Each structure stands twice: as structure tokens, then as C-alpha cells.
Image: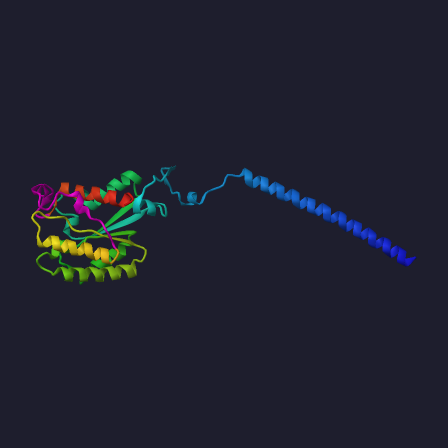
Amino acid sequence: MKNYLFLIGMLVCIVILSIGYVHYNAKLKTIANDAHEQIEASPLTSHGDRHSVNRKEDGNSTQQPEADGLIGQLLQEKDSITITAFGSTSLTSSVDSNDEAWPNVMIDQMNDQFGTGAVTLSIVDVGRTISTDVIQGDYANQVIDSNPDILLIEPFMLNDNGQVLPEDTLYVLEQLLIQFESDLPDTHVILLPANPIYGASYYLSQIEMLKAFANDHNYSYADHWEAWPSTEDGGLEDFLESGRPNKDGHQVWADFMVDYLTTNE
């Protein structure tokens, strides 16, 4: 009799467990179906949306305009970027105010396109100092302290012309670049020549050596000379004053750099 009651008890337990198992699975299936329907009804955010930049000015949110080139790439990653222009007196020469110098004209054009404050500028102008004196001064530290996203370097070929061998100018440039790569590892470095000059001869060979240096060391080279009249064209003098850019020359240089930095090559 005891064994009979035990068997009945076991059968009852098995039936109860089976009913519970079926009910539990049905409940899980209902929960899964509900969750699936909610996911399908919700709009998905693409990875690209995470990189869109919104600016907030005067309480109004505006979407950052799209741009190609290096500027466009960087503005997808951060709200604003800094450019440092490091070079000779060709950066700021022969203009009534620094606002007319090509680095400032370039930045103004970029901010007109992308919004005020999108791109900021630092200028480290060595004047007419030759390269062998530049490396002994504090100029490199000024560049490093500016902590730029983009560093435009106009080596001192024109300052050194007739005073320093081009091999020595390039040696100084290489030493500066080694320091910048160490202290500014995330900075995009772009080399560019000083302005062209009319009737240049030896200076042309110096610039060719600079281009070869940039190519051999895999540096970007902004060859803005292609936007100027030829060095053999007397019309070039209309863009120069005492061998350096005048207001019109600065405008030519700025227009080229804006195009170079904001469009795909």
C-alpha cells in the first residue's frame, strides 16, 4: 500500500513539473517576442551619427557643415581644431595688418565656411632669422606649446638663400621634425615652401631639394607655387614686395591652402 501511494505521489509531481515547464517556456517565448517587436519598432542609430558634430551658439543648435580633406576629417572628431603656421617673415610680411597675412586670411575663410571658432590659429614667425639660428632659439618650444592639430612648416629656404647651404637647412628641418614628432605625436605635419621670387635661379634648386626631402620622408607637401605666376613671369612681381608676398600674394597663398586643406586630393 505504501509503495502504491509513493508511486501516485511521484506521478503527481511529474505532472505538476511538466505543466510548470510548459508554462514557463510559453512565458519566455512571449517575453522574447515582445522584445523583438520593440527592437524592430525602434529607429536604429548608425555609427556615422556618433561622429556628427553639433555646435551650440546663442542657445541654438546647428549641425556642423560637412567638409572633405583633412579639415573635414578632424571636424568629425572634435568641435574645433588648431592650426599653427611656423615659418619666416613670408607668413606676415608686406601687409598693413596681420589680418591680411595669408594664415589669418585662410582661417577667416575656413570659419566663414564652418562657423566661427571652428578653426583657430597660432603663428610662430621667425622673421628673417636663418635656420641655424632658429634651432638655437625658443621657436620650437613655441610651436610645441601651441599644441596644434595641424602644423604648417615653411622651412627657411628663402631666409637661408645665399647664407646657409641647403643641405644644412634640411638638416635643421629634420632635427625640428624629430622634436615635433616626439612632443606632438598626434599632430598632422605639412611642409610648404616660402613664396616664389621673380628671376629665381639657385633658389629653385633649393625648393626642389625641399620637395625631394618631403617625398623621401613621406611628409605632405603643399605646393602652393602652382597657384602663383611663374618665377620667369614678370607678372609675379605684382604679388610681391621686396621679395615677400604683398596683400595680393597673401590672398593667392591663402586661397590655395584653404582648397588644399578642405578638399580631397
The image quadrant where one finds the C terminus is top left
Identify the residue at horizontal 83%, vertical 52% (top origin).
11
| Count of residue discs | 0
Identify the residue at horizontal 37%, vertical 38% (top origin).
63
Q: Which sits in the foreground, 106 or 215? A: 215
Q: In this picture, is 178 found above or below 97?
A: below
**Residue 174 visible, this angle:** yes
149 falls in the magenta region: no
Q: Picture coordinates of residue 230 (x, y %)?
A: 12, 44
> Is residue 114 rendered to the left or right of residue 44?
left
Q: In which quarter of the view is residue 252 placed?
A: top left
Q: Residue furthest right?
A: 1
Q: Which sits in the foreground, 59 or 193? A: 193
The image quadrant where one finds the N terminus is bottom right
The span picked out in magenta is 219-243
**In this figure, which colouring scheme has been used for the structure?**
rainbow
Q: Which sits in the foreground, 54 or 192? A: 192
Q: Picture coordinates of residue 30 (x, y %)?
A: 65, 42
221 falls in the magenta region: yes
> Is residue 134 rendered to the left or right of residue 189?
left
> Is residue 206 rendered to the left or right of residue 26?
left
Q: Picture coordinates of residue 109 (x, y %)?
A: 25, 40
Q: In this picture, is 31 found above or below 142?
A: above
**Residue 96 visible, this angle:** no
Q: Picture coordinates of residue 103 (x, y %)?
A: 21, 46
